């Protein structure tokens, strides 16, 4: 650490966090025991929490603004998966001694940037010291019209399975950092890393899918694992066509060179795209919503009876997947 | 670690945390992206988060059930201070490798015990590994009739200042662990330690004070520091009579033997009592509420014009306080 040290707890809040709450009447200026807000009439509240730990979810020397934005975005992605509109968030931080004022300034700037981008505000929080790695816990609160939240457990056999955007880049970034792609793919490094470091939560698409999607989840554990969560809670199976997976141009390039990487795409996490199901009769509606939200949406398979998630190749042969997604323990 | 290791993340949730959410329709069985709940008609939501870190807020070898209960209770105390009724909570945990199944079982049992005692339920959460100390982040969500939340910033000059229960035992527990009380007070150790380890959030008193208290805060940083928060946000001062501070029998005993310990009582944190203000005309009402809630309430001073918090002794001489409360940085 070379920069000025952090100020005390109250000054820390006043300097870096109160400005993030300034436009938010919910936050009471971060000066009360708790945040206070009035839900829209008839709304249901949606609440989610994600914890990111240095050395597990990010590197201690990652740019602080990107860490902050990823932390906020993974939570907004959870809200989007339920069709909810973000309302406000609470932030708890355990801060190691080697964090200086410059780090905190960059972290707060990242939050400010994404608050503006996504229309959310800090409503409350807690900061404490730790002898361990930086540990960040963000609770996001959103709203959804009563009865309209999109659930995981309501997919039906025969439903189409869709995914937004492209999948696999975040997992390919990890594979690339581990040297699994070979040096010839170095030109794709920045694109993969960008997706890994900065998810793009589908905050417009999620709410737009209310009443159309029969079930939804955001891709954090990996496509096959997350589809498995829908299937398990909905008591259905699924069949995915590997050839239909939407890859980025960079992803297509490396998978074409090393077809086995399709397993990385299927098992890898951190895509933060929406995986959702819909009645085949709603296909035109889904396509129109995708256009309206300016988010590509691709049909990648179908919900089946049974309980298995199968991935098949062009000749309908099942692809065996060794690792069904990242697990923390 | 001698016990069986922890299961994987999904099994961990299924075994220890899903049962804590079983009676709570809000939680969607912890199987969705987020918790979903419908606020009472016309209610405002109150949201608060506290983070506890091993080695900072508790000792790594403290009984896990007590750690869990303290974590939940400090948040319920924040809700009580705003007059809110608890609704549900979200829990994020960063778990070190040396935590075994027995630890987690005891931790979950502590939550189950206090869920039953306070009528709240787990609604969602996140678990992750960490290379550092156990880090726990709990977000509590409560409700209050619209416009009736008790704030910090609304105390007025001339208001009486009250505190619930007794103060100082938690700070005296710390002083005792540091050897400041001398061996002759060893018989009080258990009583002090019990208050330090297990706060008693005033969940009945807080909501009962809606419409009566002009301002409130819960005592976590220390009586003088927390009263300072009310004064700062309300733009008022305060005068406290040290002789009026309600001490426990054990607290009275050690302060009588060593009068200087009144500074410890005034500056020490972790009481988790409610400090609140009320119009002198409401004194009978406050007394009746205290009886109805079965919580002793003591008038300890008065809000003044100005901005200083003064503590005076029996002869109205000001007591100088060196340390205005515990700060984490």
Image (spheres, coloured by chain):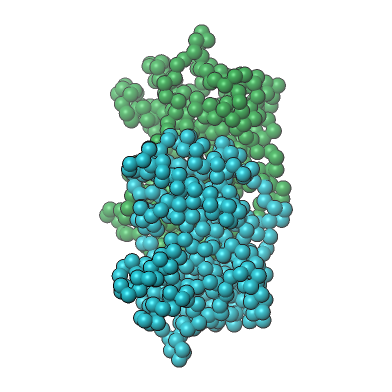
Chain colours: A green, B cyan
Quadrant showing the C terminus of chain B? bottom left
Q: Is residue B96 above or below residue A179?
A: below
**Image height of A144 relative to A171, above or below:** below
Q: Is residue B117 above or below residue A241?
A: below
Q: Locate residue B66: give its quadrant.
A: bottom left
Give the image location of residue B144, x and y in percent: 65, 59
**Residue lying farthest to the left in this orientation:** A2
Residue A132 in sight here? yes
Q: Which residue is painted at 52% across and 10% down in the image?
A: A316
- Tell me where residue B225 appears, x and y as whole percent: 45, 71
Q: Quadrant of the N terminus of chain B?
A: top left
Number of numbered labels in the structure image: 0
In the picture as drawn, the residue positioned furthest to the bottom comes out as B315
The reply, left or right, for residue A113 in relation to residue A135 is right
x, y percentage for residue A16? 44, 58
- Residues B131 and A221: in front is B131
Residue A236 in the image, given as x and y percentages of width and height: 60, 23
Residue visible at 58% across and 52% down in the picture: B116
Residue drawn 60% across the image and 79% down it: B159
At 54% from the left and 33% from the top, the residue drawn is: A218
């Amino acid at each position: 650490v070379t920069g000025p040290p952090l100020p005390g707890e109250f000054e820390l809040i006043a300097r870096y966090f109160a400005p993030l709450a300034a436009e938010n009447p919910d936050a009471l200026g971060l000066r009360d025991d708790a945040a206070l807000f009035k839900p829209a009439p008839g709304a249901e509240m949606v609440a989610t929490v994600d914890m990111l730990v240095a050395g597990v979810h990010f590197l201690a020397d990652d740019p602080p603004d990107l860490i902050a934005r990823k932390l906020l975005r993974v939570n907004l992605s959870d809200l989007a998966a339920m069709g909810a509109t973000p309302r406000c968030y609470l932030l708890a931080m355990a801060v190691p001694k080697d964090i200086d004022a410059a780090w905190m300034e960059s972290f707060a700037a990242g939050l400010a940037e994404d608050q503006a981008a996504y229309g959310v505000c800090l409503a409350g929080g807690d900061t404490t010291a730790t002898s361990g790695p930086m540990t960040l816990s963000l609770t996001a609160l959103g709203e959804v019209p009563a009865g309209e939240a999109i659930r995981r457990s309501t997919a039906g056999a025969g439903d189409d399975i869709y995914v937004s955007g492209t999948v696999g880049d975040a997992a390919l970034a990890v594979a690339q950092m581990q040297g699994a792609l070979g040096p010839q793919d170095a030109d794709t490094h920045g694109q993969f890393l960008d997706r890994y470091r900065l998810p793009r939560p589908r905050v417009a698409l999620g709410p737009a899918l209310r009443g159309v999607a029969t079930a939804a989840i955001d891709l954090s554990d990996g496509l096959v694992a997350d589809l498995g969560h829908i299937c398990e809670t909905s008591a259905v199976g699924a069949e995915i066509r590997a050839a239909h997976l939407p890859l980025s141009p960079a992803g297509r390039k490396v998978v074409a060179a090393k077809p086995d990487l399709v397993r990385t795409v299927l098992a890898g996490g951190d895509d933060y795209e929406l995986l959702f199901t819909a009645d085949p009769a709603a296909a035109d509606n889904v396509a129109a919503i995708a256009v309206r939200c300016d988010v590509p949406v691709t049909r990648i398979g179908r919900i089946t009876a049974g309980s298995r998630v199968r991935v098949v190749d062009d000749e309908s042969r099942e692809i065996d997947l060794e690792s069904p997604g990242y697990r923390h323990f």
